[in-house]
Amino acid sequence: MNIDIKGAPVYFEIPILGGIPISATLVTTWIVMIVLTGLCAWMTHGMTVRNVSKKQAAAEKLVAMAEGLVNSNMGEGWGKYVPFVATLFALSIVSSLSSLLGLWAPTADLATELAWSVVVFIIITYYKITSHGLGSYLKSFLDPVFVMAPFNVLGELFKPISMAFRHFGNIVSGVVINALIYSALVVVNHAVFGLIPGLVGKWLSAIPFFTVGLPAVVSLYFDWFTSLMQAYIFCMLTMIFISTATE
C-alpha cells in the first residue's frame, strides 16, 4: 500500500485502465453510497397509507425535514432540489463519521469536496445563463468597470473552491487533532507507568490507559459536531448560491 498525492492510502492500481489508483477514498465512498442506498431501500420498502410502521414514520420525518430545509432557504419553487440537497447532506455526514469505524474519511480528501463543488458550480452557472442569457452573464464580469473582469472571474471560480476548502479544512483538522491527542496520551501513559520499576511498570506502560475517556470526549466535537455542522454549512451555501443565481 502506498499514499497518493492527496494523502489517502492507495490499495492497488488497475493496469488495464491506465493505472487508475483505487484509493481509500474511493473504497470508503462506495461503501458509504452502498450503505445509504441500502438504507433508503429498506426504509421505503413496504410503505402503506394506514398502519404506518415506525420505519416508514422515520422515513417520512426525514423527507419532511429535508423539504422544510429547502423550502425555508430556497423557496417553495425549488422543491425539485430536495433529493439533491438531502443526498449531499447524508453523503457528507456519513463520509465524515466513517472514520469512527476505522475507515478513511472521504471528506478528509480534498478531491471529494472539490467534486461536489464542481457539480454545484455547474448548476449555478446553468441558472445564471438560463435566467439572464449568455450575453448578460458574460457582461456581468465587466461590472462595475471592465478592468474588474479578471477579479470577477476569479471571484466566480473561488465560490465553489472556498466551499470545498472550508469543508475539507475543518474535517481534516479534526482528524489531525484527534491523532495528535491520542499519540500524546500514549506517550504520557508510557512515561507515567514507566516510572514503576520492573516488569510491572513495563507491562502497565504498554496498556494505553490514558487513551480511554478523553479521546471519546474530544470526538464528540471533532467528529460528531463538526461533521454535522460542515454538512449543514455546505448544504446551506449550496442552496443560497443556487437560489440566488436567478436574481
Image (spheres, grey):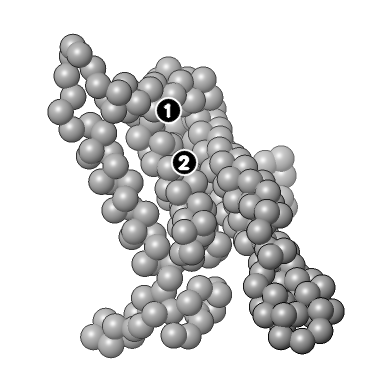
Q: Position of residue 96 (x, y in %)?
A: 52, 53
Residue 125 seen from this side? no
Badges 1 and 2: C-beta atoms under 8 Å apart?
yes
Q: Residue furthest top?
A: 50
Name the residue at 62% across, 42% down: 225
Q: Is residue 82 left or right of residue 153?
A: left
Is residue 85 positioned above or below 110 on the image? above
Residue 212 seen from this side? yes
Is residue 85 positioned above or below 37 on the image? above
CA separation in Å, label 1 and label 2: 9 Å
Q: Position of residue 236 (x, y in %)?
A: 56, 35
Residue for badge 1:
66
Element type at mark 2 = helix
Q: Nearer the viewer, residue 134 or 71?
A: 71
Q: Amino acid at mark 2?
A: Phe
Q: Nearer the viewer, residue 51 or 214?
A: 214
Q: Position of residue 86 (x, y in %)?
A: 41, 36
Name the residue at 20% across, 13% down: 51
Q: Is residue 139 left or right of residue 204?
A: left
* Between discs 1 and 2, the one toward the N terminus: 1
Quarter holding the C terminus?
A: top right
Q: Nearer the viewer, residue 68 or 50?
A: 50
Q: For mark 2, does the 10 Å Cα neighbourhood hold few (<14), some (14 to 19), or many (20 or more) residues?
A: many
Q: Which mark is residue 89?
A: 2
| Quadrant housing residue 190 | bottom right
How many numbered dots are placed on residues in this image?
A: 2
Name the residue at 45% across, 49% down: 94
Q: Amino acid at mark 1?
A: Ala
Is residue 148 positioned above or below 30 on the image? above
